Image (cartoon, rainbow, N blue to C red):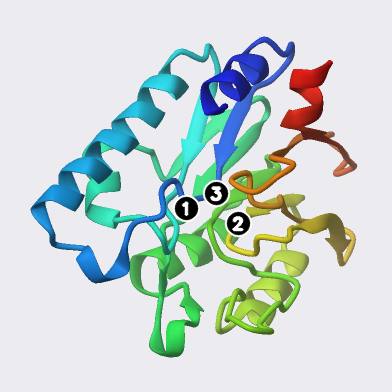
């Protein structure tokens, strides 16, 4: 199935970027250092990398809380910032803190703060695993500990922002906060009906988007 959807997306015209928001594999938390599990995890990630390498499109990918960060770094080399299709794409590699609450701290937080003060006029696409907005902490903490502060910072910036998020499996329909910051969380692709979205962020900050279900694509 994964190979089929990668091929289908690759056949689409005018696609500048493929964005993957983490949880690439369901790595067993209690076996993080098991040699056999490590090797299997590395093979799984290499398979995904090989599929994505076939695409004639720039790829940005981050790890999630179900991934092994060390294995991810062994297989993928993702620049923290790149310019694609008239926008700046910035990838954030965050972790869960106390009580499994997502945090943007240290180098990742410095990168975020510096981004908002660098004066680059291009629209910014943020790629991250956890939610900046809205707050979705029922049952499990999905939103950053200081997500509301980060959201206010984005709204206060003079540029347009598109924040692509993962982690929350039901997904969140794209919405705009403060007229400048768009937030979107695609439903988990691993669960039926295997959804992905195509976005078009116009220069004036208008977001157009389409949602596709891979089951429907195959049937058509």
Q: Which mark is residue 6?
A: none
Q: Disc 2 versus disc 3: distance between alpha carbons? A: 5 Å
Where in the figure is residue 20, as x and y percent of width and height?
54, 41
Position of 72 with respect to 218 (left or right) is left
* For the residues bearing labels 2 and 3, Cβ distance under 8 angstroms: yes
Is the residue marked by circle 2 packed among few (<14), some (14-19), or many (20+) residues within 10 Å?
many
Q: Nearer the viewer, residue 22 or 200?
A: 22
Q: SS at mark 1? A: loop
User: Is residue 57 positioned above or below 124 on the image?
Assistant: above
User: Residue at 72% across / 30% down in the picture?
Assistant: 214
Contact (Cβ within 8 Å) of mark 3 with mark 1: yes
Left/right placement of residue 204 relative to residue 121 reads right
Q: Residue 113 at what x, y percent from top left?
A: 51, 67
- Cα–Cα span, label 3 and label 1: 7 Å
> In the image shown, does 183 or 139 lie closer to the viewer?
139
Q: Nearer the viewer, residue 64 or 220?
A: 220
Residue at (44%, 46%) from the top-left corner?
24
CA neighbours of label 1 inside 10 A, class few (<14), some (14 to 19), many (20+): many
- In the rendered structure, the answer to whether residue 61 lies left or right of residue 200 reads left
Q: Residue 44, position in %: x, y?
A: 32, 36
Q: Is residue 162 above or below residue 217?
A: below
The residue indicated by pointer 2 is 166
Give the SS element for disc 3. loop
Q: Which quadrant of the structure image shows residue 12?
A: top right
């Amino acid at each position: 199935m994964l190979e089929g959807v990668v091929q289908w997306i690759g056949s689409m015209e005018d696609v500048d970027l493929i964005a993957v928001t983490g949880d690439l594999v369901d790595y067993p938390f209690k076996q993080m250092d098991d040699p056999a599990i490590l090797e299997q995890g590395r093979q799984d990630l290499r398979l995904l990398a090989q599929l994505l390498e076939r695409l004639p499109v720039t790829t940005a990918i981050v790890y999630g809380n179900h991934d092994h960060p060390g294995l991810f770094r062994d297989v993928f080399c993702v620049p923290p910032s790149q310019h694609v299709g008239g926008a700046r794409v910035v990838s954030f590699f965050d972790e869960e803190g106390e009580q499994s609450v997502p945090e943007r701290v240290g180098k990742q937080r410095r990168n975020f703060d510096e981004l908002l003060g660098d004066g680059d006029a291009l629209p910014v696409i943020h790629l991250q695993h956890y939610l900046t907005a809205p707050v979705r902490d029922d049952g499990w903490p999905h939103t950053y500990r200081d997500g509301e502060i980060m959201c206010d910072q984005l709204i206060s910036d003079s540029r347009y922002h598109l924040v692509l998020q993962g982690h929350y499996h039901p997904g969140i329909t794209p919405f705009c906060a403060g007229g400048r910051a768009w937030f979107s969380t695609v439903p988990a692709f691993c669960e039926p009906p295997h959804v992905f979205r195509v976005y078009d962020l116009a220069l004036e900050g208008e977001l157009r988007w389409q949602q596709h279900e891979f089951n429907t694509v195959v049937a058509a």
